[in-house]
Amino acid sequence: MRKHIIYSIAITILSVTSVLAQDKDKVQEKEKDSVLGTQTVHVVQAYDPSVSDAFKIKGNPSLDDSVTNAKKIIQYTIFSVPVASTFTPAKGKASGIEKTTPEKLYNSYASLGLGNYINVLADFYTSRALSRNETLDIGFNHHSSQGGINDVELDDKFFNTKLNAVYYKRDKYMSWGANFAAQHQLYNWYGINNELFTDDQIAAIDEKQSYLDFELGGNVAFNEGYVKGGDVLIRNFSDGLSSGETNVVLKPSFVFPFRDEVITTNVSINYLSGKYDRNYLTEEELKYANVQFGINPSINLMVNEDIAIEAGATLAYMMDTENSESKFYVYPNVKASYRILDEFVTAYAGAEGKLIQNTYHDFVADNPFVSPTLLITPSSQQFDIYAGLKGKFLPTVSYDLKGSFNSTDDYAFFTSNTNMETFSDIEGYMYGNSFGVTYDKLNTIAVSGEVNVEVSNKFSIGANAAYFNYSPENLDEAYNLPSIKGTLFSDFTIGDKWFGGASVYFVGERKDLLSRYVSSTDLTVEEVTLDSYFDINFNLGYKFTDKLSAFAKLNNIANNDYQRWANYKVQGFQVVLGASYKFDF
């Protein structure tokens, strides 16, 4: 067999060599012909190649080899020889893990605190599991003080009590909930300039004001389908001087598939209606009412794992049903983020806008000393363009730096109401001791930053600060808006028993206008500057058991006699001592 293979290889090499030699001779002859002269070639017939069937090798060739022998069976045995070993493994011991007793969780707690200025703090909360998929949460909180601020002639006591209940149920295809809240507040318009009034005038002032708030709401979320869910809110807000307001908000949300993406569409319907018993300058009843319709379609685009874009717009339509006016608005809604360096550096930017439904309820939440004569109209934030960087310096240090520019039509400024002391039969809020609302277009440039440090699970500290540059269109100043704000806060735990926290608030200077009728026709106006202030607070607690703990709260530790609003001084150094108790109910 080997001889046959060798002969075949030799014959093949000789044949290839002969063919190559003939090809070489032909090439040399053609080169000689090209040197001697030229020739003319006539093509008689076009080249028409064809492919003949190739010889196909059988897929399973038969093997007929006379020298092929059957495999010989080999039989063998293993002779095992034992080997002596002196190796002895060292005995190991599992390292111990420090075991901590998990904190027992209770479904209810109650706390009570008492302090100077006869401050009272009370809280109660319970969460009941009605079934495997149903829960009911009930909360109650109260904060009151009997007053006693230095150099204040009028009553300065206040209280704020709120009760809320939330029911929540989870089903296979949906989850839904309902909530109810009731709140009662009492405040006094005590911010008068004592030098302008006699004792008899001060005694004749009825400075008390109270607010009642009832809310009924609900929410639903679907796990499948085009309807994502929605929220509904019905609120009735009133005060002790015959003012009332009703606000109904409906916000359904839908999702629609589009190619490989999903379009989310949020719809809103906001109805507002209210009235006051009188105008500030006249006794004529003041009413307001409007309804807003909004739609906000948006789509989330994941360019890659580092770049995300949300593109959309907001369309809004407002009907002023009281004045028979209407207006259409279009706002941008674009957001983008780019992860530059894993979780350490992420750049983000956006341009947004919205139609803001101003309400009597929201104005009272910001400033409880407003008068019940406010002109209510929506504000239109045409755009809010922002960009920033966020991420982590270290695994335990996070940051967020942001710059923005926004423009708002009909921005609501709080301004002091005119002192009407020279007029007869006036209300208790007409002595320059209440605030109204003034609207103007406002452009704002803002720069802000925030840093949070998680030193450990027992200590954290953070800070934020913001600078604002305001440019109102018609007003001389952005009244009662500070240009600088900042906060420093910390939480800590010492051992298994002690816990606490601290916070420092800084608010920069603000300006306001104080006006006064010296006579029925002579009006004086003065611009005042409210000083900046620090407010330092500290709280400390001690756990006697896993159920019972005591706490101490120290507020305004520096005893600063600052004014949050014009002529409204705050309480000085405050100490509140109390206890909390956890239990299963």
Image (spheres, grey):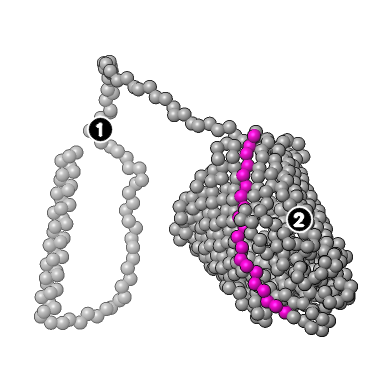
Tell me if residue 364 can be seen. no
User: Does the rendering let one see residue 91?
Assistant: yes
State the quadrant of the C terminus: top right
Q: Nearer the viewer, residue 541 or 270?
A: 541
In the image, residue 573 sits, relative to residue 380, either above or below, namely above
Q: Nearer the viewer, residue 272 or 471?
A: 471
User: Picture coordinates of residue 464 (x, y %)?
Assistant: 56, 59
Tag on residue 68?
A: 1
Q: Which residues are magenta?
A: 525-544
Q: Nearer the viewer, residue 566 or 314?
A: 566
Whether residues under marks 1 and 2 lie with C-beta atoms below 8 angstroms apart, the answer is no
Circle number at residue 411? none
Q: Residues within 10 Å of mark 2 (few under 14, many from 20)?
A: some
Q: Is residue 49 left or right of residue 306?
A: left
Q: Identify the residue at horizontal 12%, vertical 62% (top origin).
A: 21
Query: Residue 172 at x, y = what percent?
Result: 71, 45
Q: Main secondary structure of the magenta part?
A: strand
The N terminus sits in image quarter: top left
The picture quadrant where one finds residue 475 is bottom right
Which amino acid type corresponds to the residue marked 2 in the rendered image?
A: Gly
Say which residue label 2 marks.
Answer: 147
Q: Is residue 537 one of those drawn in magenta? A: yes
Verify whether residue 373 appears in magenta.
Answer: no
Q: Residue 16: x percent and y percent?
A: 16, 57
Chain-order first, disc 1 or disc 2 = 1
In this view, the mark in front (1 or 2): 2
- Label 1 to label 2: alpha-carbon separation: 116 Å
- Mark 2: which secondary structure? loop
Q: What residue is drawn where x is 63% and y is 37%?
A: 543
Please provide percent x and percent y for residue 243: 85, 66
Give the amino acid type for the residue marked by disc 1 in the picture: Thr
Note whether 497 is above or below 530 in the view shown. above
